Image: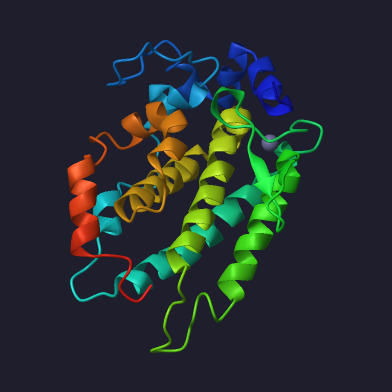
Amino acid sequence: MGGCQSHGSSAKEGDVSETGEELSAITEEKVKNNNTQAAPSLEERPYLMQGYVSARIAEIDVDMLTALPVGFDKAEWVASHTVAFFKHINLLSSALSDFCTSGTCPTITGPDGMTYYWTDEQGKKLKCSGPLYTDYAMSYIQELLSDEDVFPTKAGSPFPNGFVFLVQRIFLYLFHTLAHLYWAHFRDVARVGMHPHLNTLFAHLVTFGREFQLLEPSDTTPMEDLIAVLHPRPAPAATDRAGTATDTPWEEGV
Ligand SMILES: [Zn+2]
């Protein structure tokens, strides 16, 4: 069991009331969860409380934001969003960095205390603290985004072979970063009022990642209870996903 889970689990239920009257009033509400599985523990997963999960920075249709507009190049669309997701998530993570230390999170964890490992350049998996994993991830992504050969900025420059693979890695690290905030630091996030930003970013990232096959279902499944209430729609069926891939194959030019 990692330190982050211990940190998250050690927070008492009464902590929620510290976030203000509005949120203290929702502790008794039931979560509208359309999963058929047993209801998750709200003490363990406070982010599922209705008062939290309904908070957004604005009424935003993430499906509309995600859909590739007619006439747009798919790789350009994905690249520009990848840059934007990184900037927003890096900013949010930095703003919350005081809560995630080597003391609170000696090992970075996600839902149910699963450990996220960092893979180094030699392919070796490293167990590391929350802040170290975040630092590795953000530095890695920043370096890729700054590489003109991977994310070309000049008009007409082609995207490299393997572009999709690299973007998938970026999305996975961004997903882990947000999942860790939910799992280990949500009470802190809510206390400082950043949960509407976290919810909005997470819903948009997952929707975009699924639409363009940048996040594997196996990666997002541990957060499916939250995804189901943040963005209540059926996950793309296998035939739909295959159809999408056939219609707009990544293999063309990327
Ligand atoms: Zn942490």
Give how far across and how far down residue 55 sits, in percent.
40, 36
Q: Is residue 68 left or right of residue 102?
A: left
Give how far across and how far down residue 142 sits, in percent.
62, 66
For the question of whether residue 225 can be seen, the reply is yes
Residue at 29%, 16% in the rendered image? 36
Q: Is residue 188 left or right of residue 61?
A: right
Considering only vertical position in the picture, is 198 above or below 184? below
Q: Is residue 254 left or right of residue 249?
A: right
Considering only vertical position in the picture, is 214 above or below 200? below
Give how far across and how far down residue 165 sits, in percent.
47, 60
Considering only vertical position in the picture, is 218 above or below 215? above
The quarter in which the C terminus is drawn is bottom left
Looking at the image, in which quadrant does ligand 1 appear?
A: top right
Number of marks: 0
Which residue is nearer to you in this view: 102 or 158? 158
Residue at 41%, 64% in the rendered image? 81
Give how far across and how far down residue 13 sits, in percent.
59, 12
Residue at 23%, 36% in the rendered image? 233
Q: Is residue 248 left or right of residue 198?
A: left
For the question of whether residue 61 can be seen, the reply is no
Quadrant of the image occupied by residue 103: top right
> Which colour assignment does the render follow?
rainbow
Which residue is nearer to you in this view: 27 or 115? 115
The quarter in which the N terminus is drawn is top right
Residue at 48%, 15% in the rendered image? 42
Query: Looking at the image, which residue sits at the far right?
Result: 103
Which residue is nearer to you in this view: 54 or 144? 144
